[in-house]
Image (cartoon, helix red, strand yellow):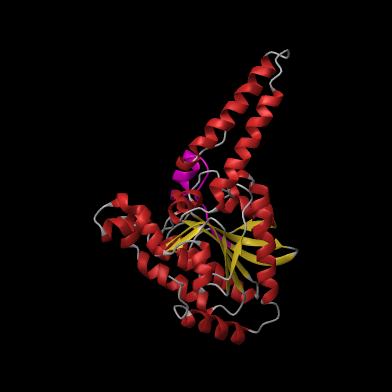
Amino acid sequence: MQNYLEFEKGLSEIEGKAEELRALARKNTEMKVEDEAAALDVKASALLDELYRNLDPWRKCQVARHPDRPHCKDYIEGLFSEWTPLAGDRNFADDLAVMGGLARFNDRAVVVLGLEKGNDTKSRIERNFGMARPEGYRKAIRLMDLADRLGLPVVTLVDTPGAYPGKGAEERGQAEAIARSTEKCLQLGVPLVSAIIGEGGSGGAVAFATADRLAMLEHSIYSVISPEGCASILWKDAEKMKEAAEALRLTAQDLLALGVVDRVVPEPRGGAQRNKGEAVARVGAVLADLLADLEGKKPAELRKARRRKYLDMGTKALVA
């Protein structure tokens, strides 16, 4: 069943009416409703194009959080073969919010890391809604070390509201673990490419996305704080999240202009949630291009270019 966002209410009514007519026709084969249903399909298609033609930042936040968007697990299953998951940080526990392991991408051995939100109530609780704890970041560090030793490129898939802010996570060194993971990204002597496939929230995302090349899906977001959190701090009113989303410049298009992102991946009509297979394939094609750009570069060359990339951030500005 299709889940609709708040701004898609009109679309929901039209598509629901078309399906209702077809359901009646299935029950009564003498009913001739195909022309009327087809007319509704045309109307729905036009409205879908209109709604997604120029989404404002807050609506992009809603789309990035859509429960039906393909998640990390979908990308791993769709793009990688010989997937061999590796578990645990060898210190405290295995964090199920972080997926990591060895795999083949276009017949090339790689290390894959990603943040998984889950797709139903049970899996979302199990995955902690994609919010990693310290052991998750330490697992990522362990696997990046492994990639460095074996000379394997690293691919990361980012979709998280942010790192888990719970008491236990703080007691186990959440901030230090995030900082060490970010540091490890910068120190790698192998290519690191990353894709933000939904939410890129705060340091929890930076710890995976400090990459040589960073791609974002067209309707994904990447920000130091959520719009709701920003509004609560600046205006003491979480309801001002629309203004906060505008001010944060968190869209893929703004971040491309700012030089934070290297590629924006176009999504299927109506967002990745309407055609998961196509969205996964498009991200795969861009990841392949980004890895090809880094092919044959030596460790010292990669580290130098990565350092320069992040030192240069902030030198570009958006036209007001």
Q: Residue furthest left?
A: 236
293 is higher (above) or lower (below) than 266: below
Q: Is residue 164 left or right of residue 65?
A: left
Magenta residues? 113-128
Q: What residue is shown at x 55% (from left), y 86% (from top)? A: 304
Q: What residue is shown at x 40% (from left), y 60% (from top)? A: 246
- Does residue 246 show up magenta in the picture? no
251 or 46, which lies in front? 46
Q: Is residue 109 left or right of residue 129?
A: right
Whether residue 226 is visible to the viewer of this picture, yes or no, is no
Q: What residue is shown at x 73% (from left), y 12% (from top)? A: 30
319 or 275, which lies in front? 319
Q: Position of residue 125 (x, y in %)?
A: 44, 44
Whether residue 41 is visible to the viewer of this picture, yes or no, is yes
Q: Residue furthest right?
A: 107
306 or 142, which lies in front? 306
Q: Is residue 168 left or right of residue 208?
A: left
Question: Which quarter of the rendered picture does the N terminus lie within?
Answer: top right
Question: Which quarter of the rendered picture does the C terminus lie within?
Answer: bottom left
318 is higher (above) or lower (below) than 305: above
Q: Position of residue 254 (x, y in %)?
A: 49, 66
Q: Position of residue 197 (x, y in %)?
A: 55, 57
Total number of numbered labels?
A: 0
- Does residue 126 show up magenta in the picture? yes
145 is higher (above) or lower (below) than 23: below
Q: What residue is shown at x 27% (from left), y 61% (from top)? A: 234
Q: Position of residue 140 (x, y in %)?
A: 51, 65
